[in-house]
Amino acid sequence: MAIYLDKNSKVLVQGITGREGLFHTQRMIAYGTQIVGGVTPGKGGTRIDTGNPVFDTVKDCVDATGATHTIIFVPPPYAADALFEAYDAGISLAVCITEGIPAHDMLKVVATTHGMRIIGPNCPGLVSPGKSLVGIMPGHVFRPGRIGLISRSGTLTYEIVDLLSKAGLGQSTCVGIGGDPIIGTTFVDCLRSFATDSETDAVVVCGEIGGSDEEDAAAFIAEHLPNKPVVAFIGGRSAPSGKRLGHAGAIISGNTGTPQSKVKAFEAAGVPVAERPSQIPMLVKERLAVPA
């Protein structure tokens, strides 16, 4: 299941008539994303300001438009059902923006929706610059290029991308995987795609405290990406033990999820770890042997 977008990606919006759904639908269309319709139960047969049709169900929208991707702006109590509905309708990639979905709901979704790529929840989405944006990212900071980026933090995604773009390092695809404990796509899933992607020369991994995803990513890099440069950054290094850092998954429990363990794992895999986001472009250029 690929993580990349192209100009032919047909996207529907679940929760399109809500304030957030409508706002970001307009922004995605302005970027060039092919939004083909939306879903809000009870409002089928109407249209939003952009002219896009609204359907009562995902299946109705897929049957009428041929949509293959969805982005979900559905409130937390109903977001799992929205993902199940997308899966049942044959959607291949679902981006779930919703924050606050119960972890037990996501356990059931992840365990039973094999074959549908899920990005999130509690994520900013993904973008293949110059092609398509499915999410809430500020499209103007992205530039087409050959650097992949994977991040648990939405805000750090935008900051790092802006730094890369200003340094002349455009991006192939950028994925905000989300900060919840249970997510549909991990660092390793993204790295597996980037490892064989001919359009990506190097990858930036932006992690944070909590969980073991970064350690898993480091082990994967050591074994499967020996010839593709990777640079890392770990957010939340100054957070005290036992304190949650913004995301539900960003909490240190005992010796698990510490910034020290993550930095140590990346360094053992030969991955340089930036002390500050501003160092990332320089480290990428060094790894690619590009003049600073």
Image (spheres, grey):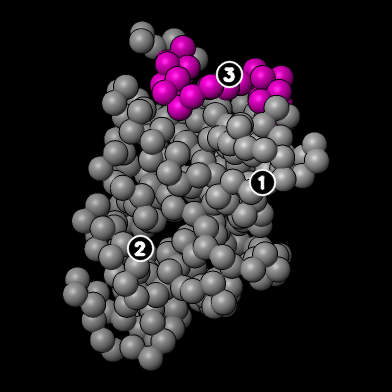
What amino acid is at disc 2? Lys
- Separation (CA) of disc 2 from disc 1: 41 Å
Residue at the spot 35% in from the left edge and 69% down from the top edge: 21
- Mark 1 and mark 3 lie on one chain; the one further toward the N terminus is 1
Q: Are marks 2 and 1 in contact (CB under 8 Å)?
A: no
Residue 72: quarter of image:
bottom left
Mark linked to residue 10: 2
Residue 51 percent coordinates (x, y): 19, 75
Q: Which residue is mark 3?
A: 272
Looking at the image, tell me whether mark 2 or mark 1 is earlier in sequence order.
Answer: 2
Other-residue count near label 2 (Cα within 10 Å), few / some / many at <14 / 14–19 / ≥20: many
User: Image quadrant of residue 272?
Assistant: top right
Q: Residue at x 80, y 36 (%)?
A: 255
Q: Which of marks 2 and 3 precedes in the sequence?
A: 2
- Which element type, helix, strand or loop, lies under badge 1? loop
Residue type, mark 1 in image:
Lys
Callout count: 3
Q: Which region of the structure is painted magenta?
A: 262-286
In the image, is residue 282 part of the stretch drawn in magenta? yes
Q: Is residue 81 left or right of residue 256?
A: left
The residue to which callout 1 is attached is 243
Residue occupying the point 67% across, 19% down: 267
| Viewer-side residue, 48 vs 18 | 18
What is the CA distance from the residue labelled 3 to the residue labelled 2?
Answer: 37 Å
Q: Nearer the viewer, mark 3 or mark 2?
A: 3
Label number found at residue 17: none
Percent x, y of residue 250 = 63, 46
Quarter placement of the C terminus: top left
- On screen, residue 184 above or below 40: above
Name the front one of labels 2 and 1.
1
User: Could you tell me which residue is drawn at 66 percent across and 46 percent down?
Assistant: 243
Residue lying at the far bottom in this picture: please name it. Answer: 42
